[in-house]
Amino acid sequence: MDAKKLIDRRSFVKMAGTAWVATLAPRDAFALQRADAVFASAFMAPDGGYGIATLTEEGEIIERTLLPARAHGMAFSPESRHAVAFARRPGTYAMILATDRAAEPIVIAATEGRHFFGHGCFSADGRLLYATENDFSANRGMIGVYDGTRSFARIGEFPTYGIGPHDMALGSDGRTLAIANGGIETHPDFGRTKLNLDHMEPSLTLVDTATGALIQKHMLPKELSRLSTRHVDIGADGRIWFACQYEGARNDLPPLVGHFSQGKDLTLITLPDRTTEALANYVGAIAVNRHEGLVGLTSPKGSVAVTLDARTGAVVKEEPVADAAGVAAAEHGFAISSYDGRFKQRQSAVAWDQHIVRLQWRSAPRHIATVPAPASAARSSQR
């Protein structure tokens, strides 16, 4: 791997501007030991700096790690015990942490002609990292493949078979990637400007990680071409749940969530009008609580969190959460964060970013099985 693509700890500290001392106070160490679970999320500090933090089930911050720039989504491998934070689009870095502290953090940079979209996931055995990337010259989505056994050197890529890939998840077979191609063209020369709102191409694809081949592709109906497919999670039955953000008229009431399975058509969930209105045409994050059969949605624009029955799609709960940001499965229901520093019922002096990842359970819940598979070489300002 080119030395320019791998930033050592000294360079990272210099880039971040200060060093974070990797030791825990006794009280924080105790908090980790007694935690039922640990989550992680990116944040912005009061001084404008960025980082990621680990938290207890009750939202108590355990430790913080500095980042060189704003992060967005995170991923975790229970097999390798690695967590990764991805830069927000059109960022070009990702930082990988050994949650057991067996190794120093590694910062990787996107290869030339690519930038990250803020999301990724690990292979079932934790040896490979997959990242959604933009080949902005060709206007096509790509999956970058990074080898965790070689300091996360980039070893290959394959297409997402769509435009503007955002989130993705590894299927229950441990081999298939479910990818949400938002359908929005962007280019780093224009920052975060959306360049094709009049001819968006949202889609959902299934791709074989071993061969890079397209397994299945779903285009949304023409009348829903402005419904950007953004985030995904997978249920206990293997269904892929997806959440959307609408780029059309504010008074439209499009379906904002749905699911599909390999070999089956998309199912768009028709929510009550009042729920769709509350979500303000924008679902910022989605999570499935597999052992309770629930789907959680959050909307920072609507300041609301919604819980659905994963079996029927019916609304179980709708609650106001000012600046609702991330959502992740908790021991019961969901952990929800906000841009104003709320995590569950605890308030902290940070602005949480859009997503949460769960790092551990004290007693493992029932979940879908996976098997290893080979792969080819502050508030509105936070939105």
Image (cartoon, rainbow, N blue to C red):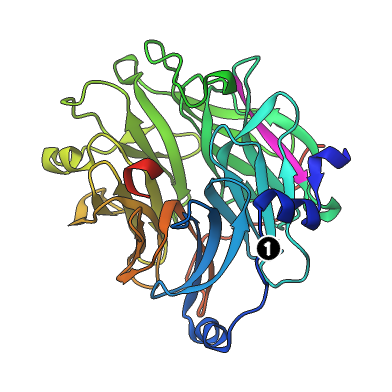
Quadrant for the N terminus in the image: top right
Q: Residue at x 57, y 88 (%)?
A: 26
Q: Position of residue 376 (x, y in %)?
A: 78, 37
Residue at the top extreme, as displayed: 198
Q: Position of residue 234 (x, y in %)?
A: 47, 50
Q: Is residue 183 magenta?
A: no
Q: Is residue 165 visible?
A: yes
Q: Amino acid at mark 1?
A: Ala
Q: Residues within 10 Å of mark 1 (few under 14, many from 20)?
A: some
Q: Is residue 145 magenta?
A: yes
- Can you say whether 92 is above or below 62 in the image? above
Quadrant in the rendering for residue 106: bottom right
Question: Is residue 79 left or right of 206 when viewed as pictured?
Answer: right
- Disc 1: which residue: 19
- Can you say whether 70 is above or below 370 in the image? above
Question: Is residue 334 left or right of 72 when viewed as pictured?
Answer: left
Q: Residue at x 44, y 51 (%)?
A: 353
Q: Position of residue 246 (x, y in %)?
A: 31, 28
| Residues in magenta, as a range | 140-146
Residue nearest the viewer, comparing 365 with 107: 107
Residue nearest the viewer, comparing 180 with 174: 180
Q: Is residue 153 visible?
A: no
Q: Residue at x 67, y 71 (%)?
A: 21
Residue nearest the viewer, comparing 101 with 208: 101
Quadrant for the C terminus in the image: top left
Question: Is residue 226 left or right of 181 when viewed as pictured?
Answer: left
